[in-house]
């Protein structure tokens, strides 16, 4: 790492921010030097996102010091922050779906050709150069609509790098990336650091923090706790500072009585997506669907729930056929679906907590065709309490909540339907270690009460820690069905990378 200037690129001291009666940030502090990668960690709700949005110009601070290059600054807009050399990649992608990949990267700053026309050839060439630098293969001309979370995240990273910013803030950039994509991202991050740029890396994955970052700042309950070089601390010490308490076993899996088959999938096939997918999930059983990003796991789940069509095969719940491409029929059959992208597909982010939790069961709450807020809140309060959703009132907008609490709201919404089967895609993506343990404990309790659970996860420790059986998907096919006692990182990864020619039939 090259020597750094005595003046930090970014410095925040005792920054505060309130939203009405809610104080999101009490005393936020952070110092980031040139030529360094600095981790910012804390539980969801610790104030990390609020701190970042103040730097990004989304919010104005109520108090404290914000300095860039030693100069006190205040940003009235995100445009001012970008002009000052700050680029932020948020946890959730924010692309324009109807525009091309290239148009998303260069939105608002398109190069111009003679005659005042946009130089599309130059934009496409620069986009290709960015993707080459990142080591990815994405068509610059294709529309953003339909891109996977991983591809959307890569585009956000390319957009930030194209701004040539002196400060790059990455909020959970690896949450939906494969191992190879993470390795490529880290190589780019290190090269930017070696150029003398400053990077802030927000992650709940401690292995990434220790592998990539030079120092780590811990926040808790809206306040600064400590800053320490990563070489001089441990994961256990950071967790203790984050939560201020002992965290129970991250995977509190308890034995549950396995009952009759609830979900039966037979020969499910969609050309180009997945082929001859056959498996079952029993009452009280947690079945993990593992595999690399892009293997077809989420596509299988979406087809089962009726969001996407499938060409052949069948889905039955408790022996009754479920109509294809009909989510309402799936809900009536007792299927609940927590999607991978909670903000885009699981929440109405501008709606209240109560309105979101009641959204699927609302028709059953009306009286004489009318729905009152009191009836809605009465129905959802038990679920909000059960999932320990941290909010002062059910009428708070979901957009003001942390990522972990938003995930709890989505889960509560579907549990309120009292399902027979819960399909949950990436249950703890972007969630802090304390909330992860809470979600895992909830899943274990639900299975213990007879709920059938199909869990999709890119985190192998989560699959191995929570699943009674592991189904491995590779290139749209199930290549292994492994019992909990036999599941190891080695045999799961071997099945996840098995080519079609080497495929073995599932047990």
Image: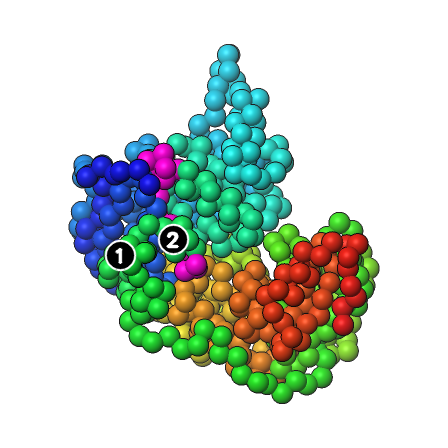
x and y percentages locating residue 212 in the rendered image: 40, 50
In this rendering, would 117 be left or right of 423?
A: left
x and y percentages locating residue 104 in the rendered image: 51, 36
- 152 in the magenta segment: no
- 194 in the magenta segment: yes
Magenta span: 192-207
The extreme top residue here reads 115
User: Is residue 112 among what the camera can see?
Assistant: yes
Crowding at dot 2, Cα within 10 Å, few <14 / some 14-19 / many 20+, comes out as many
Q: How is the image coloured?
A: rainbow
Residue at point 41% right, 60% down?
A: 206
User: Is residue 59 among what the camera can see?
Assistant: no
Disc 1 element: strand
In this rendering, would 307 be left or right of 500?
A: left
| Depth check, front residue: 218 or 365 | 218
Quadrant of the image occupied by residue 58: top left
From the image, tell me which residue sits under label 2.
Answer: 202
Q: CA distance from mark 1 to mark 2?
A: 15 Å
The image shows residue 235, relative to residue 367, as above or below, that is above
Check residue 61 in the rendering and tell me which mark sits there, or answer none.
none
Task: Of the two numbered discs 1 and 2 on the same chain, state the one appearing first in sequence.
Answer: 2
In this rendering, would 171 be left or right of 325?
A: left
Quadrant of the image occupied by residue 315: bottom right
Residue at point 39% right, 32% down?
A: 164
From the image, tell me which residue sits under label 1.
Answer: 228
Residue at point 65% right, 75% down?
A: 486
């Amino acid at each position: 790492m090259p020597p750094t200037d005595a003046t930090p690129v970014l410095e925040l001291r005792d920054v505060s921010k309130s939203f009405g009666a809610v104080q999101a940030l009490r005393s936020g502090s952070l110092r980031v030097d040139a030529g360094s990668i600095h981790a910012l960690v804390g539980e969801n709700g610790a104030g990390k996102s609020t701190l970042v949005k103040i730097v990004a110009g989304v919010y104005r601070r109520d108090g404290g010091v914000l300095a860039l290059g030693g100069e006190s600054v205040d940003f009235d807009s995100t445009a001012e922050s970008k002009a000052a050399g700050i680029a932020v990649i948020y946890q959730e992608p924010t692309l324009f779906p109807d525009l091309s990949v290239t148009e998303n990267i260069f939105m608002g700053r398109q190069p111009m050709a003679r005659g005042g026309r946009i130089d599309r050839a130059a934009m496409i060439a620069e986009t290709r150069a960015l993707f080459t630098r990142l080591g990815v293969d994405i068509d610059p001309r294709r529309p953003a609509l339909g891109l996977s979370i991983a591809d959307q995240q890569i585009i956000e990273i390319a957009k930030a790098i194209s701004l040539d910013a002196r400060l790059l803030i990455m909020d959970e950039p690896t949450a939906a990336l494969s191992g190879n994509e993470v390795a490529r991202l880290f190589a780019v991050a290190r090269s930017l650091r070696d150029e003398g740029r400053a990077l802030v890396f927000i992650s709940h994955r401690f292995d990434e923090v220790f592998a990539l970052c030079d120092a780590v700042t811990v926040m808790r309950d809206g306040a600064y706790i400590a800053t320490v070089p990563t070489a001089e601390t441990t994961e256990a010490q950071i967790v203790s500072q984050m939560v201020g308490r002992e965290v129970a076993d991250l995977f509190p899996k308890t034995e549950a009585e396995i009952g009759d088959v609830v979900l039966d999938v037979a020969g499910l096939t969609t050309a180009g997506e997945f082929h001859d997918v056959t498996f079952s999930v029993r009452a009280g059983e947690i079945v993990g669907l593992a595999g690399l990003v892009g293997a077809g796991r989420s596509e299988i789940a979406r087809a089962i729930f009726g969001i996407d069509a499938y060409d052949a095969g069948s889905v039955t719940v408790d022996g009754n056929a479920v109509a294809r491409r009909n989510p309402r029929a799936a809900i009536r059959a007792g299927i609940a679906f927590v999607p991978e992208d909670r903000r885009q597909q699981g929440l109405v982010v501008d709606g209240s907590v109560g309105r979101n939790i009641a959204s699927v069961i609302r028709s059953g709450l009306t009286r004489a065709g009318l729905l009152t807020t009191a009836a809605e809140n009465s129905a959802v309060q038990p679920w909000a309490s059960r999932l320990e959703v941290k909010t002062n009132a059910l009428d708070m907008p979901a957009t003001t909540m942390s990522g972990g609490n938003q995930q709890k709201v989505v889960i509560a919404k579907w549990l309120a339907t009292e399902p027979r089967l819960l399909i949950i895609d990436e249950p703890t993506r972007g969630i802090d270690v304390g909330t992860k343990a809470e979600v895992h404990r909830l899943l274990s309790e639900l299975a213990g009460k007879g709920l059938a659970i199909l869990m999709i996860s890119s985190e192998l420790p989560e699959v191995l820690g929570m699943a009674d059986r592991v189904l491995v998907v590779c290139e749209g096919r199930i290549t292994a069905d492994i019992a909990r006692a036999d599941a190891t990182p080695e045999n799961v990864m071997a099945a996840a990378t098995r080519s079609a020619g080497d495929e073995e039939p599932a047990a």
